[in-house]
Image (cartoon, rainbow, N blue to C red):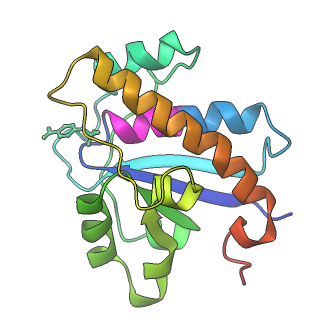
Amino acid sequence: MSISRILVVCLGNICRSPMAEGALRARIAGSHLAGRVEVDSAGTGGWHAGEPPDRRAIACARRHGVDIGGLRARQVRARDFEDFDWLLCADADNLRDVRRLAPPAARERVALLLDWAGTVPGGEVPDPYDGGDDHFEEVWEMVDAAALAAIERLSSRAGSGIIVP
Ligand code: 4NP
């Protein structure tokens, strides 16, 4: 099986996408796909580039046994469309923005994370930045369920990346 490369994208790359990156890394490491999937995250905006995740995101992931404190934010770049098989977006704004940046041939590899994973068809991960700890918990539940479902998808030929169809 080939290696699949996934980039999770949100707005700031300090809340939703690093949490999703952490959930994906942890679930994949504990699965039969360990070592076969590369995961990274980025933001459509660059305001937080170089910063660690929001402390509330770090605390939330830690409550679930996942350390995301070493991650650093960066902005989506043109090379990402070559470096990753799938660019999975937190919400519809992110999807629109990443598709605008994408070369035409790459557009079908840009999707909503929850939709691609199949956990919530057409679903979005709500921005917790202005919310409380319960909003971060809600994000974790969503991205962790998507991470589990992603393992199923990546295990099937249809989900394994640029070797499709
Ligand atoms: P994220 O949350 O997109 O989940 O990382 C946000 C973080 C920062 C900002 C917006 C959303 N901001 O405007 O700075």
Q: Is residue 44 visible?
A: yes
Kindly identify the residue that appears in the image at 25 percent across and 31 percent down: 128
Query: On the rendered structure, is 68 left or right of 34?
Result: left
Whether residue 32 is in magenta: the answer is no
- Farthest bottom residue in view: 104
- The image quadrant that residue 94 belongs to is bottom left
Q: Is residue 71 visible in the rendered structure shown here? A: no
- The image position of residue 54, as x and y in percent, is 28, 24
State how many labels appear.
0
**Residue pictured at 56% horizontal, 44% vertical:** 146
- Percent coordinates x, y for residue 42 in the rendering: 37, 49
Residue 137, quarter of the rendered image: top left
Main secondary structure found in the magenta portion:
helix
Question: Which quadrant, please, contains the N terminus?
Answer: bottom right
* Residue 35, percent from left and from top: 78, 44
In magenta, the rendered stretch is 15-22
Q: Is residue 156 left or right of residue 127?
A: right
Q: Quadrant where the C terminus lies?
A: bottom right
What residue appears at the point 80 percent right and 46 percent down from the top-left corner?
A: 33
Q: Quadrant of ligand 1?
A: top left
- Left/right placement of residue 74 relative to residue 119 reads left
18 drawn magenta: yes
Which residue is painted at 45% across and 29% down in the image? Answer: 140
Q: Nearer the viewer, residue 52 or 138?
A: 138
